[in-house]
Image: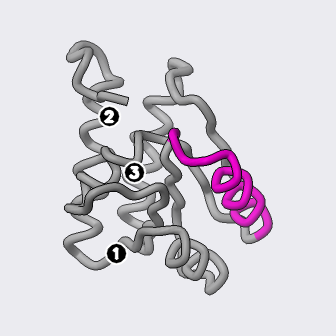
């Protein structure tokens, strides 16, 4: 997903904010990434919000959907692996987890803004 294709309306602004908040969380140490670390944070009860790339494998999506439902952690499918990785200064990432409730709330608010027009492929709130 190239979030800069359309520069009108609330959707691209919200997408840019999501990537900005993800970058801030990474720099502040309130974000971990990668499947192993995401799974660990969810199971330890540290995860406040999980983001899975829309182009992640179906197996990855199913695994995290089931896990987040069980542990009652909000999960969103947003962006592409390259976009998520770029936001945190990495090459690519299929999964991210926010560890701070305040940042998670801000990101979730923007993701809900994007979802209002049906532009997100999948959304699950556990």
Q: Nearer the viewer, residue 48 or 31?
A: 31
Residue at numbered disc 2? 14
Question: Residue 34, how many percent across, how many down?
Answer: 46, 68
User: Which quadrant of the structure image shows residue 118?
Assistant: top right
Label 3 environment density (alpha carbons within 10 Å; few <14, some 14–19, many ≥20): many
Q: Is residue 62 magenta?
A: yes
- Secondary structure state at the residue bearing disc 3: helix
How crowded pointer 2 is (Cα within 10 Å; few <14, some 14-19, many 20+) is rated as some
**Relative height, residue 1 to residue 78 (above, below):** above
Q: Give the SS element for disc 2.
A: helix
- Point out the tag, 3 or 2, that comes first from the N-terminus: 2
Q: Please give left or right for residue 78 compared with residue 59 in the image.
A: left
Q: Quadrant of the N terminus?
A: top left
**As drawn, 92 above or below 18:** below
Find out whether the residues at labels 2 and 1 contact each other: C-beta distance under 8 Å. Answer: no
Q: Secondary structure at mark 1?
A: loop
In the image, what residue occupies the spot 77% across and 59% down?
66
**Residue visible at 64% across and 64% down?**
73
Bounds of the magenta segment: 54-70
Query: What residue is pinned by disc 3?
Result: 107
Q: Percent position (x, y) of residue 109?
A: 44, 44
Q: Which mark is residue 51?
A: none
- Quarter of the image with the C terminus is bottom right
Residue closest to the eye, 49 or 54: 54
Magenta: main secondary structure equals: helix
């Amino acid at each position: 997903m190239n979030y800069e294709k359309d520069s009108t309306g609330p959707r691209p602004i919200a997408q840019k904010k999501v990537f900005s908040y993800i970058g801030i969380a990474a720099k502040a140490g309130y974000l971990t990434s990668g499947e192993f670390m995401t799974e660990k944070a969810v199971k330890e009860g540290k995860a406040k919000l999980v983001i899975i790339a829309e182009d992640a494998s179906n197996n990855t999506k199913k695994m995290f959907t089931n896990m987040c439902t069980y542990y009652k952690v909000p999960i969103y499918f947003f962006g592409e692996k390259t976009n998520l990785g770029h936001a945190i200064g990495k090459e690519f990432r299929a999964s991210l987890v926010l560890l701070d409730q305040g940042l998670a709330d801000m990101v979730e608010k923007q993701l809900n803004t994007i979802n209002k027009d049906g532009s997100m492929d999948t959304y699950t709130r556990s």
